[in-house]
Image: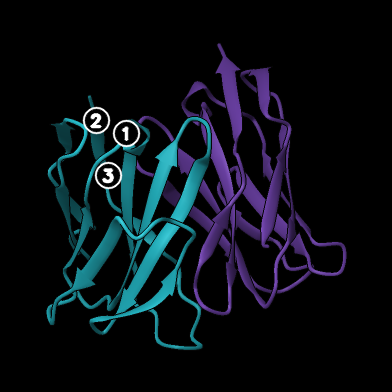
Chain colours: A cyan, B purple
Amino acid sequence: KAGVTQTPRYLIKTRGQQVTLSCSPISGHRSVSWYQQTPGQGLQFLFEYFSETQRNKGNFPGRFSGRQFSNSRSEMNVSTLELGDSALYLCASSSEVQGAGETQYFGPGTRLLVL
Amino acid sequence: EDKVVQSPLSLVVHEGDTVTLNCSYEVTNFRSLLWYKQEKKAPTFLFMLTSSGIEKKSGRLSSILDKKELFSILNITATQTGDSAVYLCAVANAGNMLTFGGGTRLMVKP
C-alpha cells in the first residue's frame, strides 16, 4: 500500500500571500489530520477531517483552514501568510472510525518558508 | 488542556548501551499513547499502547504504559547509530486528536 503523500514538498512564499497544501491519505483511510511542526513549539494539531467534515480543530487562527474531498484527499489553506507560519506541515491519515482508535501514519510533510 | 512531557530532552550514548525514554501525560478522555521516531523527515510509527502493563516489543525496542501513574517508557537495548533520532510521544484523546511531547533527541555514537 502506498503511504501518505503530500505536495508540494517545499514551498517559498512571501508575507501576505496565501498557500494551499495537499495530502493524499493511505488508500482506505478516511481520517486526515494536519499538524504544524516548528523548532519552538514542536508538533501542534491543526485540524482533523473525516468523511468531508471537520471533526476536530486545534488552537490556530482562522487563517488556517482545510477541507476534505469525497476521495478522502485533503487540502489545507493558509491565508495572509506571516513569518511565523514558516514550518513543516505534516498530514497524517488513519482508518479511524468513530470510537475505533487507530494509529495515525504521517506523510513526508511540506516545508513552508515565508519570507 | 492536554499535556505531554518527555524526558530527557536529549541523550548521548555509545553503541551497545541501553536507553530508557520517559513520557508523562495529562489528558482528558485518554484513548491511546503512541511512540514515533523522527529522523530528518516525517515521524514513523513505533508503538500504540492502550492497556496498562502490557509490553509491546519490536526487535530491540519495547514500550509499556502505566495508566494509573500516567506515564510510558520506551526502551532501546543494544543501541546502534541508526537509532539516532528524535523520539516523540503522543497521546490521543477520544476525538482522535494527538497531543505531542517535545521529543527526546537521542544520539548514538559509534
- Residue, disc 1: A86
| Left or right: residue B20 compared with residue B107 | right
Q: Residue at x 32, y 31 (%)?
A: A83
Question: Percent from the top left, x then y, of residue B106?
Answer: 59, 27
Helix, strand or loop at label 3? It is loop
Q: Is mark 1 on a helix, strand or loop?
A: loop
Please give the name of the residue rendered at 48% of the width and 46% of the height, measured from the top-left corner: A43
Q: Which amino acid does label 3 sit on?
A: Gly
Disc 3 target residue: A109
Relative to residue B52, is residue A67 drawn left or right? left
Subunit bearing disc 1: A
Chain letter, disc 3 residue: A
Quarter of the image where one finds residue A9: top left
x 31%, y 57%: residue = A64
Label 2 residue SS = strand
Q: Which one is closest to the eye, mark 1 or mark 3?
A: 1
Which subunit holds the residue at mark 2?
A
Q: How many labels does the image show?
A: 3
Residue that mark 2 sits on: A114
State how far apart marks 2 and 1 are (Cα): 5 Å
Q: Which numbered disc flags the more N-terminal residue, 1 or 3?
A: 1
Q: In which quarter of the image is residue A13?
A: top left
Q: Position of residue A110 (x, y in %)?
A: 23, 42
